[in-house]
Image (cartoon, helix red, strand yellow):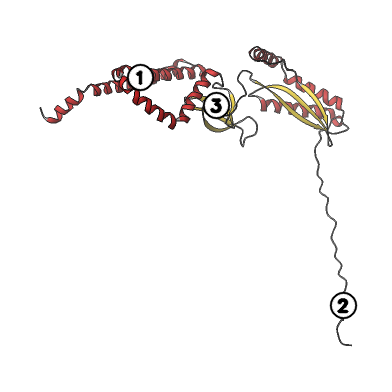
């Protein structure tokens, strides 16, 4: 038997090498099983939320099985590595403190109820809908920026999970998926202020449908049972304030967190229709600037009377 073959047999007979080969085979089998399971979930689970959480569960189970396999295969060698692992762990913890903070943030998000996929949140100054929560980062579909109101920009933003420990987390649709919204309407002095109030109250009542009101009340009762809160007014409210230029009405109403822009469009459309029917009785106030043409500028030059001064007589 030649030397290369003998060396290969000796190398393969080494217990450590056999353990490494066994570990690689086990990890490959776990990865293949995880991918096959996730592919089958896409075929059998039709609900997107259930499919998302099932994929996450399969991925976490794969990581757990991988750790268990490595531990079982190398269990006879772990005892002597305790001191080395401790020293190396201290250095790794210092170098990867941001990564460790993100993992800790992921644990807090998962078990602390900060937000879930589908919630509308604001993290680190970025506003958007949560589309994925990873071990290190949360992925958002961005809202706002150069796009007015609560509409998608199309950008995908990934934010480190450690942000939950550093900055406030604004959740627009967590326990209470509704918002109080307001619109302000300037009305000219001299308009029928009573009729204007009736119009706004009627439009607000059209927005506050029975279905929406019941959903809002049920969600708010859950909030009162869970937190230390007082009952709040759920019905639309119209208030009036006077300033130097016009009468300013404010319509306050409840709206679904993801229908804020469309609801405001509906309200303004109905107000304009009602004001058109009211004619000159109710008129919207506005600031008007009028540019007046400047009078023509005429310049008259008188003859120079000092022309002969200093000449000899």
Query: How packed is label 3: few (under 14 Cα within 10 Å), some, or many (20 or more)?
Result: few
Task: Write the residue at 85% across / 56% down.
Answer: 295
Kindly indicate the quadrant of the structure image that contains residue 202: top right
Report if residue 191 is visible in the image. yes
Which residue is under mark 1? 30
Q: Earlier in the sequence, mark 3 or mark 1?
A: 1
Which residue is under mark 3? 165
Task: Write the residue at 48% across / 18% down.
Answer: 53
Q: Please give left or right for residue 42 compared with residue 239 in the image.
A: left
Q: Pinpoint residue 282: horizontal percent, then vertical percent.
A: 84, 30
Q: Pinpoint residue 134: horizontal percent, then vertical percent.
A: 48, 25
Which residue is under mark 2? 306
Q: Earlier in the sequence, mark 2 or mark 3?
A: 3
Q: Quadrant of the C terminus?
A: bottom right
Q: Quadrant of the N terminus?
A: top left
Relative depth, front residue between 78 and 267: 78
Q: CA distance from mark 2 to mark 1?
A: 110 Å
Task: Write the residue at 62% across / 35% down.
Answer: 147
Instruction: Identify the element where label 2 is drawn.
Output: loop
């Amino acid at each position: 038997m030649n030397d290369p073959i003998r060396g290969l047999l000796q190398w393969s007979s080494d217990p450590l090498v056999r353990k490494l080969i066994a570990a690689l085979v086990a990890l490959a089998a776990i990865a293949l099983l995880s991918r096959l399971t996730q592919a089958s979930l896409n075929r059998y689970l039709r609900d997107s939320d259930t499919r998302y959480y099932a994929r996450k569960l399969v991925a976490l189970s794969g990581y757990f099985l991988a750790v268990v396999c490595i531990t079982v295969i190398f269990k006879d060698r772990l005892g002597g590595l305790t001191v080395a692992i401790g020293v190396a762990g201290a250095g790794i913890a210092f170098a990867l403190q941001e990564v460790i903070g993100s993992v800790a943030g992921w644990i807090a998000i998962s078990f602390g109820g900060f937000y879930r996929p589908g919630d509308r949140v604001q993290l680190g100054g970025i506003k958007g809908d949560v589309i994925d929560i990873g071990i290190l980062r949360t992925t958002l579909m961005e809202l706002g920026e150069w796009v007015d109101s609560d509409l998608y920009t199309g950008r995908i933003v990934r934010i480190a999970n450690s942000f939950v420990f550093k900055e406030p987390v604004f959740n627009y649709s967590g326990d209470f998926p509704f918002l109080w919204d307001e619109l302000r309407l300037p009305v000219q002095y001299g308009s029928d202020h009573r009729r204007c109030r009736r119009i706004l109250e009627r439009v607000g009542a059209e927005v506050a449908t029975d279905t929406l009101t019941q959903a809002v009340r049920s969600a708010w009762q859950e909030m009162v049972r869970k937190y230390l809160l007082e009952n709040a007014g759920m019905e639309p409210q119209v208030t009036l304030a006077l300033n130097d230029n016009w009468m300013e009405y404010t319509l306050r109403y409840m709206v679904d967190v993801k229908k804020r822009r469309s609801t405001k469009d509906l309200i303004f459309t109905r107000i304009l229709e009602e004001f058109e029917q009211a004619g000159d009785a109710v008129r919207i106030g506005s600031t008007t600037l009028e540019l007046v043409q400047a009078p023509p500028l005429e310049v008259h030059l008188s003859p120079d009377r000092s022309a002969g001064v200093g000449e000899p007589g």
